[in-house]
Image (spheres, rainbow, N blue to C red):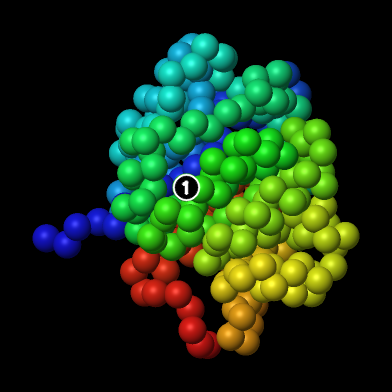
Amino acid sequence: MTEMPITVSIGDGIIDAVELAPGQVDYLPGGAALNLAVGLARLGLSSQLVTRFGLDRYGFLIARHLREEGVRIFNAPNADFTGIAFSRRRNGEPTYEFTPEMYRRRIVFTEEVMIVVENAASVAVNSFPFDDARQTDALVEALERAIGITVVDPNPRPRLIHDMDAFRQGAERAMAKAALVKLSDEDTALFYDGDRQAAIDRLFDLGVETLLLTHGGDGASLQTRSGLSVSVPIAAHSPPIVDTMGAGDATLAAVIAFILRRGMPRGA
């Protein structure tokens, strides 16, 4: 029997308080890294999540969800509450408000976590406090020790970021250690004033080999330093799109699973 590749996702594990109708709020396990970890598990990979949530009722909800999905959890002991992101929809796109715990988020790289990172087939960072220099230092050290495919999706949330320049600089330090970087058009707007070619040139200069660029309703594109350029439209879907939350995380999970099974894209 073939052993499943081990994947590690690093970043937010939170509660999404989703208001789909006025006054109707559902509390669901979420966060970019959690979504990614669950997606990888559902695609048949051995999935592990390095995150931070509290030992409260919401934290127990997250832990139960991850156990049911077959995701192994690394959550260092802490005395904080679980972060909650409140979201409302405007034309299917979510807008966010965050509880104070979200601004105190801390990912702890214990020796156990470092061993897992060193031996994983892929290590993916999806939403991280890059404006915290000490945490970014620890993350970069972990990525330097990884022998598998390294992936970074900075996934910035402007309301959570104290200093966008510091966040971008921290994200670029991590992206410089990545074989694959994912950026949405919104990320490109925040980091590089919406200049897609400037973003591509900058990240290739940093040493990134492959870029996955997502364009909302216009689909996605993939660029490599070797010159490959591929664009794909969104899948045909006749009913109206109610909610796009997690779409980028699902796309990234599918790409990572493909790479682990088929290798990095080299040609059309």
Which residue is painted at 77% across and 36% down in the image? 161
Name above or below for residue 108 compared with residue 239: above
Q: Position of residue 245 (x, y in %)?
A: 63, 44
Q: Position of residue 259 (x, y in %)?
A: 42, 69
Q: Quadrant of residue 248?
A: bottom right
Q: Is residue 147 left or right of residue 238?
A: left
Q: Nearer the viewer, residue 175 or 70?
A: 175
Q: Residue furthest left?
A: 1
Q: Position of residue 46 (x, y in %)?
A: 30, 49
Name above or below for residue 231 compared with residue 250: below
Q: Position of residue 108 (x, y in %)?
A: 49, 31
Give amino acid for label 1: Ala
Q: Nearer the viewer, residue 233 or 8?
A: 8
Which residue is painted at 53% across and 32% down in the image? 107
Label 1: which secondary element: helix
Name above or below for residue 144 compared with residue 91: below
Which residue is painted at 43% across and 19% down in the image? 77
Q: Quadrant of residue 82?
A: top right
Q: Nearer the viewer, residue 222 or 245?
A: 222
Can residue 64 be seen here? The reply is yes
Can residue 45 be seen here? The reply is no
Which residue is painted at 39% across and 42% down in the image? 114
Q: Is residue 42 left or right of residue 4?
A: right
Neighbourhood count class around disc 1 (C-alpha, 10 Å): few under 14, some 14–19, many 20 upward:
many
Total tally of numbered discs in the picture:
1
Q: Quadrant of residue 137?
A: top right
Q: Pointer 1: what residue?
A: 142
Q: Quadrant of the N terminus?
A: bottom left
